[in-house]
Amino acid sequence: MPPPARNIELKPYGVSNLTTNRVSTPPVSNRFDRDIGIDAKYGITSNVTLDLTVNTDFAQVEIDEQQVNLTRFSLFIPEKRDFFLEGQGIFDFANATGGGFRAPDAPIMFFSRRIGLDGGQPVPIRGGARLTGRVGKTSVGLLEIQTDEGAVDPARGTAPAPAANFLVARVKRDILRRSNIGIIATRRSPRSSTSSGRPEDLEGRTGASGSNALAGVDTSFNFFENVQAGSYYARSDTPGLSGNASSYRGYFRYVHDRYGLDTERMKVGDAFNPEVGYVPRLDVTRTDMVARFSPRIRSVRSLRKLEWNAEVERFVNGRRQLETRVASGTFRIELNSSDVLTATYRNDYEFVTQPFRVSGGPRLPIGLYEFNEGVLQFNAGAQRKVSGRFTLTAGEFYSGHRQRVEYNGRVKVSSHLAFEPRILASHITLPEGAFTTKLLGARTTYTVTPRMFVSGLVQYNSSLNTLESNIRWRWEYRPGSDLFVVYTDGRDTFGRRSAALMNRGLAIKATRLLRF
């Protein structure tokens, strides 16, 4: 069997990390913390900027949106902290975090969420510096962050994360007309180590092991108007970890408006371990091919385009065993109103090498599974008062069946008030048992003035039995200077007590911009 992934699931940044541990702990009331942090920005040239941060605080950041994981792999939760979002594109490696060409199963060599979080628990950031900009045809990025030792979590009963230094360097050079080549290097150096460095101590840990380094090179080529190609090669170095520590990817795309063809091959070694990155699957070789025919319709006034799409995706492990195969066919209708209707039929093949539990439901045993599923999706155009994505899914699911309903959208009440409801319900029937997962949430935004708004996020997750709420008030009292008031609480809906309070917090944060 393959070794377990060392990059474990990235848990949401918020109160949900604490509510999932139903351990009786002494209550804390009226605890008052005071912190002062400093952020400085200095323009070295018109195109190069130096950012400095000391005692960085993210009290104003909204909690993460909950997800329901019905797979055996970790979820990807995007970054929300402003300091790391600024200049993020410069550190992007092989279109890993955007650009529309990211393979959903491709590794991310630098994922800023690894900094300041350990196993889903916040770790204090002592300070750091970031240099970003462009010199001629070359883009450069340099980031160094120092974290402090994490707090001991009594519920988990584990040692605190050690203080560590994170270093990321990125250089990308424009070549030819619309192409580029780049390199990246990352390093994580703990000041004290809580593990012995043996492979068995490294498995299942996120950043709490010994030192780790990674280096990689990537290319992106655009020929003519419709031909694209690219590749990357990266290798990690983790003391005490043996095996194939490299990863590569190559792709070719023909992106004509009427016809399209995508081919891709990617490999991730069993010992590839970017501890400042994110790897969904280890020890696999992914092969993917997509063919598209999408004519524009001029004879029907309401139609803009029709699209037929066929895709085959395969994952083969290091022992040349087929672990996953997905064959799908999609028919898409795009209207001139910007509404889109999509119908997809897919055939899944899964070789489950280790038993896993489906989102709090029954445990699926080792074995081969082949199942078929249909998906119907409607995307309402953003110009409508009620917009968003409606999805209906029905069919087989591993050894049973699944019916799923999902809506993610926006309801515009007025120019000042808008709701963003989120509904996801799945009913799954397996020989091992039947269960239903529900994820309900809504974000509300009210704009008081152009410089003041109030937003709230409420969400319920039946898989975790949690109810979360987050209310934020922001006032930009002068350009570049803000006042935040944030209230967050998490409640446990498990057991007889209804929505028992697990934790809550009130944060007041003021920032002041000083120009010199």
Image: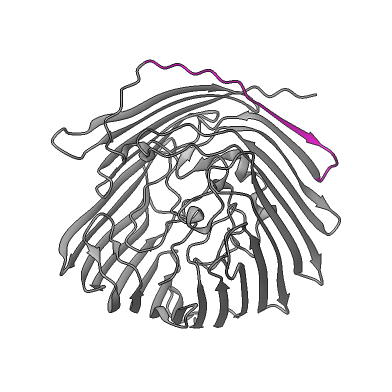
Residue 266, position as x, y percentages in the image: 57, 75
- Please tell me in which quadrant of the rendered image residue 231 appears: bottom right
Relative depth, front residue between 306 and 202: 202
Q: Is residue 400 above or below residue 148?
A: below
- Let me know if residue 264 is in the magenta part: no
- Locate residue 219 relative to residue 337 in the image: left or right: right
Q: Indicate how the structure is coloured in the image.
A: one colour
Residue at image coords 72%, 22%:
514
Relative depth, front residue between 87 and 334: 87
Q: Is residue 462 above or below residue 246?
A: above
Residue at image coords 43%, 63%:
4
- Locate residue 258 relative to residue 129 in the image: left or right: left
Which residue sits furthest left? 496
Q: Which residues are magenta?
A: 30-47
Whether residue 210 is visible: yes
- Please tell me in which quadrant of the rendered image residue 248 appears: bottom right
Q: Is residue 469 above or below residue 406?
A: above
Residue 264, position as x, y percentages in the image: 57, 79
Whether residue 295 is visible: no
Residue 505, position as x, y percentages in the image: 40, 25
- The number of numbered badges drawn on the structure is 0
Q: Is residue 383 above or below residue 57?
A: below
The quarter of the rendered structure image containing the N terminus is bottom left
The quarter of the rendered structure image containing the C terminus is top right
Residue 321, position as x, y percentages in the image: 43, 82
- Locate residue 502 relative to residue 322 in the image: left or right: left
- Please tell me in which quadrant of the rendered image residue 215 appears: bottom right
- Locate residue 366 relative to residue 165 in the image: left or right: left
Is the magenta region chiefly helix, strand or loop?
Answer: loop
